[in-house]
Image (cartoon, rainbow, N blue to C red):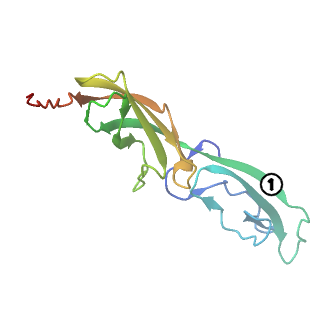
Amino acid sequence: TAKTGLTYTGQPQELVTAGALDAKYGTIQYSLSRSGFSTEIPTKTDAGTYKVYYKVIGNDDYKDINRTYTLTVTIAKKELTIKSVGVAEKTYDGTATATIESVAFDGLCGSDSMTMGKDYTVTGVFSDANAGENKTVNVTVTLSDTAKANNYRLESGKTTATATIEKRTTRVEFTKLD
């Protein structure tokens, strides 16, 4: 029987529950590729949809059943949330563009970590371009198409943070008139 309700855990998971067959008739064998059948239950770690093939191999008294059956099993992506965002302070330059220094996620499995620029992209925009303290920064995080990131989905890729736009130093030069 195909297992249901599987979600990415970072660990191998059995895709099916072993079939019941009286040993006097033979054994049930499994494969993920329609070849290399064995009695071991197939496992997968990454989120995705998999086909599990199985067939009955007879014993000394019973013939093999000349048919291969297929089950489809899905390991769902694990849900992530954005825990925090680090935004760099900047000096007023007339733009609202913010530089994001870091993003921390809740929900990563085991030793998994995400690398900015590889596993996800992030943009930030101040609420306006004017100088000020504790200004709202609207942040958008998008997971990339990498082997690691494909095991996760973001509940929401949008959040806010705060940062400062420092006033620009004004430089005034005086020239002596003759």
Q: Residue at x 20, y 27 (%)?
A: 167
Q: Position of residue 169 (x, y in %)?
A: 17, 31
Q: Is residue 48 left or right of residue 95?
A: right
Q: Residue 69, image x and y in percent?
A: 83, 56
Identify the residue shown where x is 90% and y is 71%: 63
Q: State which quadrant residue 82 falls in.
A: top left
In the foreground, 127 or 120: 127
Image vertical order of residue 130 relative to residue 71, above or below: above
Q: Nearer the viewer, residue 102 or 133?
A: 133
**Position of 70 relative to 23 (above/below):** above
Query: Is residue 26 visible in the rendered structure shown here?
Result: yes
Which residue position holds label 1?
A: 70
Q: How many marks?
A: 1
Q: Quadrant of residue 42?
A: bottom right
Q: Residue visible at 17% across and 29% down?
A: 170
How far across and how far down the image is residue 172, in percent?
14, 29
> Residue 145's spot in the image, x, y percent?
58, 49
